[in-house]
Image: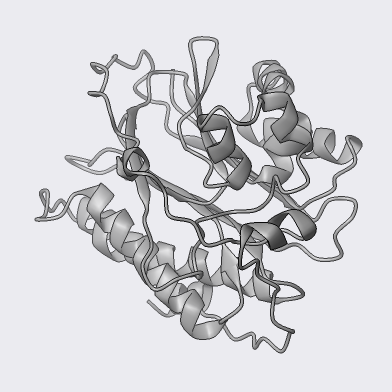
Amino acid sequence: MELLRRLFGLNRESGSPPARHLENQTDLYENLEPAVVPYTPPPDEDETLQTRPLAPPRPFKNTRQHLRVGQATDPGQVRSNNQDACLSFIAMPDVTDSPAPIGFFVVADGMGGHDNGEIASTLAVQTLAKHVLSEVIVPHLSGAGPGRRTISEVLNEAMSAANRAVQKRISDGGTTATCAVVRGDEAHLAHVGDSRAYLIADGTMELITRDHSLVRRLQELGQLTAEEAEVHPQRNVLYRAIGQGESLEIDTVTRRLPPSSRLLLCSDGMWGVVGEQRMMAILEEYDDPQEACDRLINEANASGGPDNITIVLVQMPD
């Protein structure tokens, strides 16, 4: 427990100036700084991303293989500090009546100016990890059966706890968060902001999260094309993020992970710079998840590296 306390302790103090926020749509188009703007989504956006039943399970050919993971983060070529944060945790017990391997993975992209964003993303990752370790992973490893709450419910509560923690510690800070619990061949995800999760399987790359950004919403309403969104001056403006309000609406989704599939979590410093087609080409080139992450970071930096870059790549057995 002392190790966990040391791992997830937070001792940094924030003395940075408050972030600037946009109060209305007029300010939105006059100010070019990334920010979170007040926004009330239409009724259809209140629905969870889990809108279809899970695919039937597919057997793994190599039962001796386990989960593999790659992880990388980099400040990029422009920013002086790294306001992203990430964490990977895998438990692969090999004992009598072993439970299935289980892992927890998270990417967070902080905002708020100077150290505020850095502390917000770190605090969110720590809070999420504490909840998932105590409420999901430890009970799973101890052989406890399903509790009264589902994994998605625990993730929802963990996100809400992270929201409260960031608000209490950094009044003008905020962060995105995209996290996943992988248990057996199922991935349970929770998501807020514009970091992303992709499922790579059978030669395809599927985006399984929704960006909570102004330009994405305008695209969904048919008021902006994908090409226009890529160069829009407010493409980084979010309407939903951790630390930006007392209540927080959280997207949850569950996906089946077939053999040899990959789950990719990344910040917008990755997907917004390299693009999905090039990302897919690199992923197909490298079998080792860590090598793939390192190569993706290099590609983003070679493309200018205008933002912090963070990737977590989970590889399923064959």
Q: Is residue 173 above or below residue 176?
A: below
Q: Is residue 90 above or below residue 253?
A: below
Q: Count all numbered tags in the image, as a single digit.
A: 0
Q: Evaluate whether residue 54 shows in this view.
A: yes
Residue 89 located left or right of residue 55 = right
Q: Is residue 71 above or below residue 109?
A: above
- For the view shown, which residue lies furthest in the front direction? 26
Residue 164 in percent (x, y) is at: 41, 76
Residue 103 located left or right of residue 203 = left
- For the view shown, which residue lies furthest in the top direction? 203
**Which residue is depicted at the point 36% across and 56% down?**
249
Residue 207 in percent (x, y) is at: 51, 28
Q: Evaluate whether residue 133 shows in this view.
A: no
Residue 298 located left or right of residue 135 = right
Residue 314 in percent (x, y) is at: 51, 35
**Which residue is depicted at the point 72% across and 49% down?**
234
**Which residue is depicted at the point 31% across and 57% down?**
156
Name the quadrant containing residue 115. bottom right
Quarter of the image with the N terminus is: bottom left
**Which residue is depicted at the point 27% across and 18% down?**
55
Quarter of the image with the C terminus is: top left
